[in-house]
Image (spheres, grey):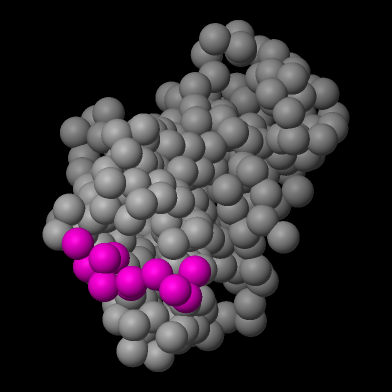
Amino acid sequence: MSKIEREIKLLNVNVNKIKATLEEKGIKPKGKFIQDIYTFDLPPIDELYIKYLNILVKENDKRGLSKLIFEIRPCFDKEDLRLIKKILGTNDLLEFINNANNDYNKLFSDELLKLLKKTNENFSKWVRLRQTGDETSITIKKIVNSKCEYDLDAVNELEIKISSIEEGKQLLEDLGYFFERHQIKMRIAYDYKNTEIVIDKWPKLPPYVEVEGPTREEIDEAVLMLGYKVEDAIVINTDDVYSKIGIDIYSKEYSDLSFDAKEQAEVNLYMK
């Protein structure tokens, strides 16, 4: 079952200080890992829309289109809904699709296609294939607020355990996802009450701490326990942490990121 991911980051941390603080409180690491991470993306929303719309018209199969519209519907603002109503007579695309008496050719409207193309800008869904020690998982992540902003209660995730990286790659490719990038990172993980505290080190980034928990109050308690102020905690995507230091993680130059020799030596010390 999917869940809302609630996590914050503490950037540019002193790893040895964090480890010492946790050790003083009797909190031992539950695992130290080098993680192998592959990210997969979907084709653009407007391409998927046309694909599923053609299936609806030719085969009377509305499943693909209905699921797509259900996912992107939170992205529509009031102006978008007014445009949809002008074209279809209703601002509820799902309602229109589910009524077999409607003229589905209206869904090919140029104005509607432009709207779907614009939706690519404020819809974000990606798949992470990750190996942590002997465990491999696929996680589907989706930003679920209308502004497509990475926020505390805005990321929905569904995680599935699988047997291997190879099986995961084949499964995702068969489902129509395409490989975007590969990264290596270090993770040292701890449990504190109902939260998980992890120390992460990515290539070219200073180490940071993530705290994930069921509520903001429990996350804040963990932040204070680590010796930080609540105001030090920020909600930010790792991609945006890279942006802060001028790296566009989506560029081909960084499609395969691993530690250089200096970073690997640093990581080896952290994991002792």
Q: Is residue 103 magenta?
A: yes
Measured as percent of width and height from the top left, residue 107 is found at 28, 65
Measured as percent of width and height from the top left, residue 113 is found at 21, 59
Above or below — where is 184 with respect to 131? Answer: above
Position of 189 compared to 258: left or right? right
Q: Quadrant of residue 37?
A: bottom left
Measured as percent of width and height from the top left, residue 24 is found at 79, 23
Q: Residue at x 27, y 28 (%)?
A: 244
> Magenta residues?
99-109
Q: Nearer the viewer, residue 220 or 2?
A: 2
Position of 75 compared to 243: left or right? right
Q: Residue furthest front?
A: 101
Q: Residue at x 26, y 53 (%)?
A: 87
Observer able to see residue 196:
yes
Measured as percent of width and height from the top left, residue 270 is found at 55, 41
Above or below — where is 258 with respect to 216? Answer: below
Q: Quadrant of the N terminus?
A: bottom right
Q: Residue at x 57, y 80 (%)?
A: 164
Q: Nearer the viewer, residue 120 or 82?
A: 82
Number of numbered discs overlaid on the protein picture: 0
Q: Residue at x 54, y 19 (%)?
A: 233
Position of 262 compared to 66: left or right? left
Q: Nearer the viewer, residue 48 or 175?
A: 48
Q: Is residue 62 magenta?
A: no
